[in-house]
Image (cartoon, coloured by chain):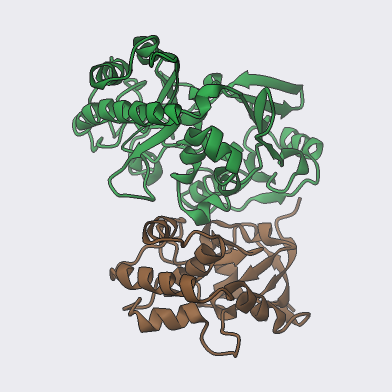
Chain colours: A green, B brown
Amino acid sequence: MRPFAYAAPATLAEAVRALSEAGPGARVLAGGTTLYDLMKLDIETPPIVVDVRALRELAGVDTTGQRELSFGAGALMADVAADPVLMREYPALAESLAKAASQQLRNMATVGGNLLQRTRCAYFRGGLAFPCNKREPGSGCAAIGGLDRGHALLGGSDACIATYPGDWAVALIAFDAVLDVAGPRGERTLALADLHVEPGDTPDREHTLDWDEIVTRIRVPVTPAGRGSTYHKVRDRESYAFALTSAAAAVSLDPDGAVGECRIAVGGVATRPWRCRAAERELTGAVLDEQSLRRAGEAAFEGARPGTHNAFRIELGIRTVAEALRIAGERALR
Amino acid sequence: MTSEVAIEFTVNGWSVHLRLDPRESLLDVLRERLGLTGSKKGCDHGQCGACTVHVDGRRVVSCLLPAVQVNGRSVTTIEGVMGLEGGLHPLQQAFVDHDALQCGYCTPGQVMSGLACIAEGHADDDDEIREYMSGNLCRCGAYTGILAAVREAARSSPVQEAALSRAADCGAAREADDPRES
């Protein structure tokens, strides 16, 4: 690991100032479970690290609001996952956290930092031996035509097919979450849907934050469809693995059983958290049955581009969406 | 901002003052600076759980914790785990009774994780224990014994937290300095 300077500011304003003075190479440290991990691999080499883990301004979780849920960016994944209101009223959100990582990691990682986790692509993480346009723009992509079993079927480009591996962002994007961000130019709010970008020609750029901005809060508009929701995660093993395919689904049902509100997003299969509006349109006003669930799954994977070893995840993904909707529908009836 | 950072924290009740390179993980500090080699380095990337310790009473993977972040906090390692009478903690005894180890390399992490799993209230049934112990890998495959040990300790020993706090009380306010400091 390269040597670095460590700063532990006492306030958010100090943290913003420290970042701003340090320059674009600086990195924010929260739980460290992504940044410190990548620093061990010399993939991240910041000269300065600004520790925001204990900042009071980033703390606090409120799931009792009438208009919105509010999560401080510094709240721990484990604590948010165990929030009883969240588990009851928005199980997709609670499950997306509980089904991620391990309890040890969830006790360290923050819900803000989790949004910004980086790909698990083995070529990206493997270092200089492997061409990687994300690590070194222009060097090529070893995954395209390589061992691409876990790589993206949606949102990829000729430069990069690295999968966004996170779960929490997938569930949040289904619920139209917004982020509050602080920086030297003031505070702003953006839709989570506008945070991540697809690789295109510039896979080294993964999100729209400026280098001197810090995520402070995640907010989710309240919706009754939250109760009828789930985060369904399919993996090679039962637990403690990234998703082969995953789906966040939320539905509200009219008295006649037709779908009123429908929210679907998929994970583990795309280069960014992937909202499935076509699938939602397919189901709105329809009754949930085997055929309509299947149609929604197929709509979600319309345009999926298989590589060499990952085609099976298209069918798997379709079924994951269908199953997630089936579970969501059952919960909506409770 | 300097390249060396002074921190102060407690380990198993002992007060520790160190000047650290920010690159050092808590695991490396425990093993290399403090001689507490019970916590193991299995993967060094937070993927195996062999390095599991408790910080402020919560289980974490110490290989992914920059040691500078434990300033002002309390750390408990496997060396701080014991029974109320000073012998094996009931969970440790259950590991022995249920053949929950072969080579023993993952075992300190399994025990630290198991203690926390029970204290968190995540040991109500076998499926829950399997899920909440899933962050600890065992290459020897002693999982069924580990499950049985955690199950038994959860059922019969409500005093885990008492045993852990007793470990913290032993040696409270004693000072420990890095022998390399001069």
Outermost residue, front direction? A255
Q: Position of residue A296 (x, y in %)?
A: 31, 17
Q: Is residue B148 above or below residue A175?
A: below
Q: Quadrant of residue A111?
A: top right
Q: Position of residue A300 (x, y in %)?
A: 33, 18
At 72% across and 61% down in the image, what residue appears? B71
Q: Nearer the viewer, residue B162 or B137?
A: B162
Q: Is residue A217 visible?
A: yes
Q: Nearer the viewer, residue A100 or A69?
A: A69
Q: Quadrant of residue A245?
A: top left
Q: Nearer the viewer, residue A81 or A211?
A: A81
At 31% across and 30% down in the image, what residue appears? A323
Q: Is residue A239 above or below residue A205?
A: below
At 74% across and 79% down in the image, what residue appears? B182
Is residue A1 shown left or right of residue A249?
right
Is residue A144 shown left or right of residue B65?
left
Q: Is residue A111 above or below residue B89?
A: above
Q: Is residue B34 above or below residue A254?
A: below
Q: Is residue A196 visible?
A: no
Question: From the image, which quarter does the C terminus of chain A lie in?
Answer: top left
Q: Position of residue A42 (x, y in %)?
A: 48, 48
Q: Quadrant of residue B70?
A: bottom right
Q: Position of residue A304 (x, y in %)?
A: 27, 20
